[in-house]
Amino acid sequence: MDLTDRPRRLRTDGVRPLVAETSLSPTDLIAPVFVDATTDERVPIDSMPGQERVPVSAAGDRVAEIEETGVEAVILFGIPESKDAAGTRAYADDGVVQRAARRIDAETDAYLVGDVCLCEYTDHGHCGILEETAETDPTLTVRNDETLDLLVRTAVSQAEAGVDMIAPSSMTDGMVAAIREGLDSAGFEHVPIMSYAAKYESAFYGPFREAADGAPAFGDRRHYQMDPGNRREALREARLDAEEGADVLMVKPALAYLDVVSDLRREFDHPIAAYNVSGEYAMLHAAAENGWLDLESVALESLSAIKRAGADLIVTYFAEDLAERL
Ligand code: PBG
């Protein structure tokens, strides 16, 4: 054969690493940690093998274990001791995330990201203050502008507790601008915001809602989270968040939305994050448990695909288990 171009020349073991286009490092990863104020034991999460809810007293130990694998950043989610209509435990100085952050800060060197949302803290499970007609009119569930004030209070109280980066996930219009202003006027102008800029109304969050006890009591999140079929709208959302001062732009979920990751990569100079969500984790584990897939291989391939699409950082439940392989 008279072939001049033979791509296979570059696929031998010796040269493959030299021409690799994508690399993964433990420092690209953020590991989620669930802190639970209702327990004093570490409780495994059934739908997410290997993940657990930890009491505040064990939060430092849990994060130290993650750090030992080489992962240097964690994102905190809280399960509060009580819930109410306004999610007051989200912005309490002695709230579960605030107490855990103080502890982790004192006991470890980890970089702490705080998820800022109200759905784990409201008794109705929605991500903000409800409209009076919310139960009967699912097209209008959450009051946008009244919710902003509570998100700002949550972000500031987390920063006061030692959280290093604020990650608002409620898809409230104007949330980045409001939080930026709130942080700045409280003296936290150096605390960055990683916005869940394009967060879809996705069924892949199922296991998380069990883990964090944050499923809506009625209706769904269509009124505030994005329609899974919309691609251009993600750019519009990201542009707004960038203009409002977001430092990092996130796409969520990751695997079913790699086109969106790629669009954001091309359009913005900001670091792009992707959230490899609970359902994506649970699917691979379930198949592996049946012997249908090799867990480590598919997990590595998934994270590599997310980076290839353009993500700089990945929030993933695989962080701890894969870090040692990287
Ligand atoms: C809070 C929040 C959710 C997730 C992260 N932050 C749940 C939701 O929006 O319903 C999901 C994460 C996952 O599924 O791993 N709003």
Image (cartoon, rainbow, N blue to C red):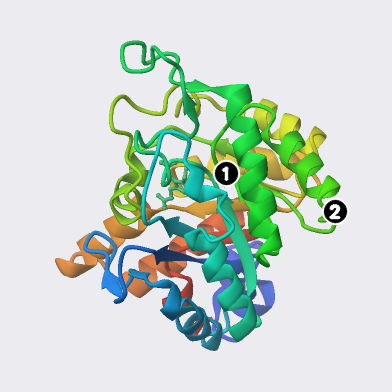
Please identify the quadrant where the C terminus is shown: bottom right
Which residue does the numbered mark 2 point to in the structure image? 189
Residue 296 falls in image quadrant: bottom left
Q: Is residue 33 above or below residue 109?
A: above
Q: Is mark 1 within 8 Å of ligand 1?
A: no
The answer, for residue 119, to whether it is visible in the render is yes
Residue appearing at x 38%, y 72% in the figure: 55
Amino acid, disc 1? Val
Please identify the quadrant where the N terminus is shown: bottom right
* Element on which disc 1 rests: strand
Residue 79's spot in the image, x, y percent?
A: 39, 56
In the image, taking residue 125 as reference, residue 195 lies left or right, namely right
Closer to the eye: label 1 or 2: 2
Which residue does the numbered mark 1 point to in the structure image? 251
Residue 186's spot in the image, x, y percent?
A: 81, 51
Residue appearing at x 77%, y 38% in the figure: 242
